[in-house]
Amino acid sequence: MARSGTTQKVTRIQREKTQAIMDAALDVFSRHGFRGSTIDMIAKTSGFSKPNILYYFDSKEAIFAELINRLLKDWLEPLIALDDHGEPVDEVCAYVRRKLDLAQAFPRESRLFANEILQGAPHILPQLAGPLRDLVDQKAQVMDRWITEGRLAPCDPVHVIFMIWASTQHYADFDVQVRAVLNTPESDDHFQQAAIHLDQMFRRMLTPA
Amino acid sequence: MARSGTTQKVTRIQREKTQAIMDAALDVFSRHGFRGSTIDMIAKTSGFSKPNILYYFDSKEAIFAELINRLLKDWLEPLIALDDHGEPVDEVCAYVRRKLDLAQAFPRESRLFANEILQGAPHILPQLAGPLRDLVDQKAQVMDRWITEGRLAPCDPVHVIFMIWASTQHYADFDVQVRAVLNTPESDDHFQQAAIHLDQMFRRMLTPA
DNA sequence: GTCTATAGCCGGATAGAC
DNA sequence: GTCTATCCGGCTATAGAC
């Protein structure tokens, strides 16, 4: 029994193997969604057999749940790093940059979350209404303070944060559309363009008059 | 044989019934994606039987394809309406407003497209690389002209258009997350806030110095 | 721990009566 | 045109040998 929930010691082999399975699962789930993915796809991608995967995880559902919950932390990290002692406009633009870099480096994770939220966030709704909401509120308060101090242009901080999420993740989630419109099927050049564009736009939005 | 492709006269009953099926299909597909949806769900939602639905459509795939292709036109309409003879900043902001209104009025359609693009746009990739790309190029040229005339602030028009798509559709596609963060599970108040926020932001971004 | 084989369910599509 | 019944393939999960 290598399944979670026991107090049993977990070997290095076990950890590496579950990690390999989760990586393959990320690949498959992010491209096909939960229902569109099969354990067989994860098996072929990881190189393990189907029953072998079900030896390490209780069910397909369990793989997905473990995966998305483990990634959630990393996904909030960039916002946590927004520093209330920094220069306001620079801080927000640095956050935009971090989010865009994340979208470029981890598009699978971005698509996985997008899919999950589109389906109504069945696995992570509590986390959205709890930790995420609290984090956003906290950072919105910081931005509100910056506004009253005249160091950030008047705006609705929460909706600015929505705008940052939307406009950065767009390049990962709607990747196909972006490439089709820009007519650059290969290469990641557009991320460079996007970085310049987004920095310019958010500076204009947020620099006090 | 009531299926498409024949030259046979289509009765009012047939039109109404296919329409009812497509409406139910939109409901189901937009919530669960293609693979996550079953003909049985569409049957229950529409009130018809499963074989009856397959009498009017060749396959599940055919329902989806018909649905998404029919909606594609309506989805491009707001951008087509961007008028090169209007006042530049007002025109772009009016476009933003139209897009946001569309997201509020037709969230199912928005989610359907989001799902399709996330999966790699298997059904509409040609339309993205063709008509959509052409339309965006054309409107980007208009905006470039406005910039050289000094009537629009310097920017990358295509990425501005991406930003408009992302930040408006966000309120439909990531609805659950928006509600969780704002803590307003019911009501559409946040669309009003979003309208004000987006108008303000895009004006700042695009009004010449 | 890992395999082959298979149980058992679900879903798309069809057959055929009415 | 619409129904009930059913076929058949695919998928999750388990049984049981090794």
Image: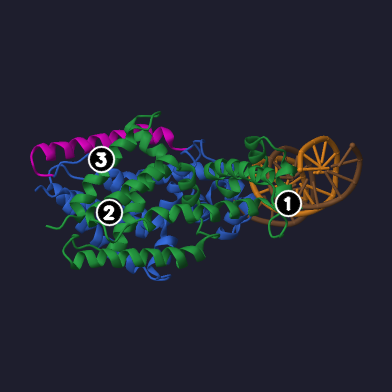
Chain colours: A green, B blue, C orange, D brown
User: Is residue B138 highlighted in magenta?
Assistant: yes
Q: Foreground mark, 2 or 3?
A: 2
Left or right: A58, with A68 as reference point: right
For disc 1, the chain is: A
Report whether mark 2 lies on the same chain as mark 3: yes
Q: Quadrant of residue B174?
A: bottom left
User: Is residue A89 highlighted in magenta?
Assistant: no
For disc 2, the chain is: A
Q: Residue at x 36, y 45 (%)?
A: A100
The residue to which callout 3 is attached is A196
Circle nearer the N terminus (2, 3):
2
Magenta segment, principal secondary structure?
helix
Stretch in magenta: B123-152
Q: Residue at x 19, y 68 (%)?
A: A148
Where residue B153 appears, as percent x and y from the top left, is 14, 44
The crowding category of the residue bearing disc 2, from other C-alpha atoms within 10 Å (few below 14, some 14 to 19, many at least 20), is some
The residue to which callout 1 is attached is A2
Q: Which residue is at the front of the view, B144 or B134?
A: B144
Three-letter code, disc 2: Glu
For disc 3, the chain is: A
Give the secondary structure at mark 2: helix
Left or right: A208, with B132 as reference point: left
Cα gap from disc 2 to disc 3, whole angstroms = 16 Å
Checking the image for residue A91, the label placed there is: 2
Report whether mark 1 lies on the same chain as mark 3: yes
Q: So how many labels did they put on this image? A: 3
